[in-house]
Image (tube, rainbow, N blue to C red):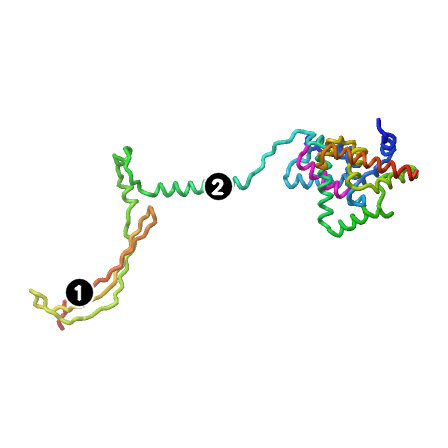
Amino acid sequence: MEDVVTHEEDWKVCFAELGPGLVLFARQFVRSIADAEDIVQDAFVRFWRKQHSVTDRGLLYATVRSVALDLLRRDARRARREATASADMDQTTEPQFDFDDGSQRALAAAIDRLPVEQREVLVMKIWNELTFAEIASALTISQNTAASRYRYALAALKKNFVVHE
Amino acid sequence: MNDFSELEGELKKLRPRPVSPDLSARIEVGLAQTEAAGRGTATAGVLPKQRKFRLNWFALGLGLAAAATFLVLARVNVDRPSKSAGLALLTPAPITPAAKAVDSFVPAAMTQVVYDRKDEGLHFAEGQDEPMRRVRSRKRETVQWHNPQTGATLRVSYPKEEVTLSPVVGQ
């Protein structure tokens, strides 16, 4: 019984630490927080059920990404809608961040305009503090590619952000 | 170090939206359902994996089938008389009268069906002064034997003809 309690505390502590970053990562594939949370719920349960080590963060994020892509593939209409939303980035998209001022709002909008390949690397690096090795593992790309996408993302943001400043 | 350090600092100031409170509860339900389905305790690598006994139904079925086959074959071998006489069989075990009696057929029933009876009139048998009435009967007789040990039944049916001579009482 004590073990069960301990295990429950384990996953709660783990999720409290990683949850917001995971939802933010999932949010890169869908346009609503609710969908992102559904993805994280499914992925986290799958990950925990298989008793993977939580130190393998690359695998955890890969699981979230896999569930997100499965969701998009399952519903073609949904995929089209998400693709359209990604391309157009209309104003109905739910914000991913809490803003303190207009500057942050502009920065968040600039992030939304990045290609998804760059956004997912940026999110994993900045808000989840994954190493390039872990990012490469999650996305099944090389570390160099992960680092390149990160630099491209920063370069694009800097350009757009300066314009909005 | 690089041109992006200031930008990275600005990015880190952005706070992701908090997770809705019910997400944790939903995950808890999902993990509880997993445990209820017997797929293992909900724990990641934080704790060492617990070795749980899992019943392999396929292996169990295979084992039971093998055991049943063995029993059937063993039964067949017991019932089948041995063709090769080994050294141990050179001296047959004495058969007790009781055992012999048990492992044999005993009469169980007999039926007689008379399907024809014919009066052939009076006849004088040799050495007799009185006439005798001769009656010929045709029957089918069935005798049944039963082996109490094995439960086997043997039935023999055969035709039978019987001639009866009965004295005629004078009037």
Q: Residue at x 13, y 68 (%)?
A: B132
Q: Which mark is residue B64?
A: 2
Chain letter behind tag 1: B
- The answer to whether A79 appears left or right of B40 in the picture is right
The quarter in which the C terminus of chain A is drawn is: top right
Quadrant of the drawing holding the N terminus of chain A? top right
Could you classify mark 1 by the number of other residues whose Cα lies within 10 Å: few (under 14), some (14-19), or many (20 or more)?
A: few
* Viewer can see residue A27: no
Residue B144 is one of the magenta-drawn residues:
no
Residue A40 is situated, as x and y percent measured from the top left of the image, at: 75, 40
Given residues B14 and B92, the one toward you in this image is B14
Figure quadrant of residue A106: top right
Choose top left, top right, bottom left or bottom right for residue B156: bottom left
Residue furthest to the bottom: B171
Which dot marks residue A74? Answer: none
Chain label for disc 2: B
Q: Secondary structure at mark 1?
A: strand
Judged by depth in the image, the label closer to the viewer, 2 or 1, is 2
**Could you tell me which residue is drawn at 15 percent across and 66 percent down?**
B165
Q: Nearer the viewer, residue B143 or A14?
A: A14
Q: Amino acid at mark 2?
A: Leu
Q: Which mark is residue B164?
A: 1
B29 left or right, relative to B156: right
- Which sits earlier in the primary sequence, circle 2 or circle 1? 2
Q: Nearer the viewer, residue B32 or B105?
A: B32
Image location (x, y in percent) of residue A90: 85, 48
Q: Would residue A49 be seen by someone viewing this image from the given angle?
A: yes
- Secondary structure category for the residue under label 2: helix
